[in-house]
Image (cartoon, rainbow, N blue to C red):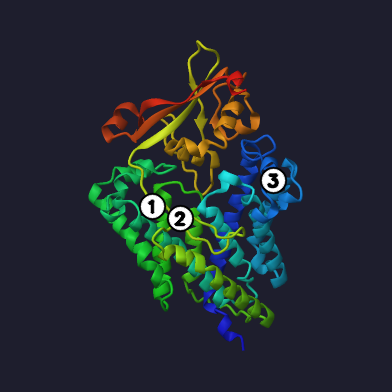
Amino acid sequence: MWDWAAAPDYWAARFAVTHLLAITYLLGFVSALRQFRGLLGERGLTPIPRFLARVPFRDSPSLFHLHYSDRFFAGVCWVGVVGSALALVADLAPLWAWLALWTLLWLLYLSIVNVGQVWYAFGWESLLLEAGFLTIFLGPAEIAPPTLVLWLLTWLLFRVEFGAGLIKMRGDACWRDLTALYYHHETQPMPGPLSRWFHRLPRPLHKVEVLANHVTQLVVPFLLFAPQPVATGAGLVVAVTQGWLMLSGNFAWLNLLTTTLAFSAMAIPVGLPVAGLPPWFAVLVVLLTAVFAVLSYWPVRNMLGKRQVMNRSFNKLHLGNTYGAFGSITRTRYEVVVEGAADFDAEWREYGFKGKPGDPHRRPPQVAPYHLRLDWLMWFLALSPSYGRAWLPALVEALLRNDEQVLRLLRHNPFPDRPPLLVRAEFYRYRFTTRAERRETGAYWVRTRVGDFVPPLTLEDLT
């Protein structure tokens, strides 16, 4: 009776989706565990207790409304880490254990995101939550993958890709005249080890890259719903494109998640005997599909509307979201360089960040799929000081106090013995060195001072 609801040819696809998603959850919980004290802890830049005092549960559903302490937050992260590791072998578990484990992971990460404030205002956080929620209903290896859940995952991938393609065509003219990659590899938020090489590719090849991007995001998504083997081919195109993006820059786990979703469209018969869906579970999947059909109204309306927005969650559970990225391209790269001085007559020494450009001689590191949240916000800060309104004064104060938890977010503290007397931020223009400049100086960047961003401040000034 319920044979239509099962898709045994997608057993391998489910295996890939669930295991890659478990790894992504693991990255998310580890990232939270390692960074939350400096960003969100009781003495962090934007403390969670202060947020909870002004935002009610209905506006940010989270376990932390019941109780918050740094120790409790760390405990939630550790449970998530262990749960993510167990999810790698959960396909061997019975259906009830599968449902319990994946639901727990989703609830824990939702609790973190909903109190994460500006540090968690990234599209891939909502994408992880939406994909994680759907994976609850994929089921373990003892049953066949549910057809409708695979379609919902494919529909999620469609929104990610097509939404990104639309926002580009509607946004910056450089996407339409195919010149966007004249700038993007150099001005993207977090360049990687190969970004300079990509930037120095011939300009005609940059135009081919943009054209291929348009095909992948505006045409290929429709083929995901075509009969096999066309859908599998479309999924492979998406996966290859995401691999190209992984090589050219650092976008946290966005590319990993998009690749994960691409497997949901791939039918790879493996010949393993699997049982059909239990009737009660099949009914649950049908109800899930009906709920997402309703939730899809808002992202569809957004994509079809003239004023499309990127990365918007239409509800506090982060389900049925709209996605998109880089509707506009920055032509010139600016960086905020933070410095300290031991006294009024001492030389200024630069703080080093783990991922973002600073020292011109330092090669851009490979960070993704890990997410350095402060480094990303520093890129936004260079676009507009308004992005730092909630946390930049606290960062300056933390550096003036040599706050241990905040300093752990950095790569290099030039004042290991005692705090600086003064902290300032300078505004620089950065560009990649040419091949000749690289051979002559050994530098990856050329930077030119533009002016002050934050004037020299002492603790007394902040008081």
Question: How many marks on residues?
Answer: 3
The answer to whether marks 2 and 1 mark residues whose Cβ atoms lie closer than 8 Å is yes
Q: Which mark is residue 52?
A: 3
**Badge 3 amino acid:** Leu
Residue 227 placement: quadrant: bottom left
Marks 2 and 1, Cα distance to the nearest angstrom? 8 Å
The answer to whether marks 1 and 3 mark residues whose Cβ atoms lie closer than 8 Å is no
To which residue does mark 1 refer? Answer: 327
Nearer the N terminus, badge 2 or badge 3?
Answer: 3
Q: Camera-side residue: 241 or 179?
A: 179
- Residue 355 visible in the snapshot: no
To which residue does mark 2 refer? Answer: 310
**Badge 2 amino acid:** Met
Give the left or right position of residue 178, taking residue 451 as reference: left
Label 3 element class = helix
Could you classify mark 2 by the number of other residues whose Cα lies within 10 Å: few (under 14), some (14-19), or many (20 or more)?
A: many
Give the left or right position of residue 347, taking residue 286 as reference: left
Marks 2 and 3, Cα distance to the nearest angstrom? 26 Å
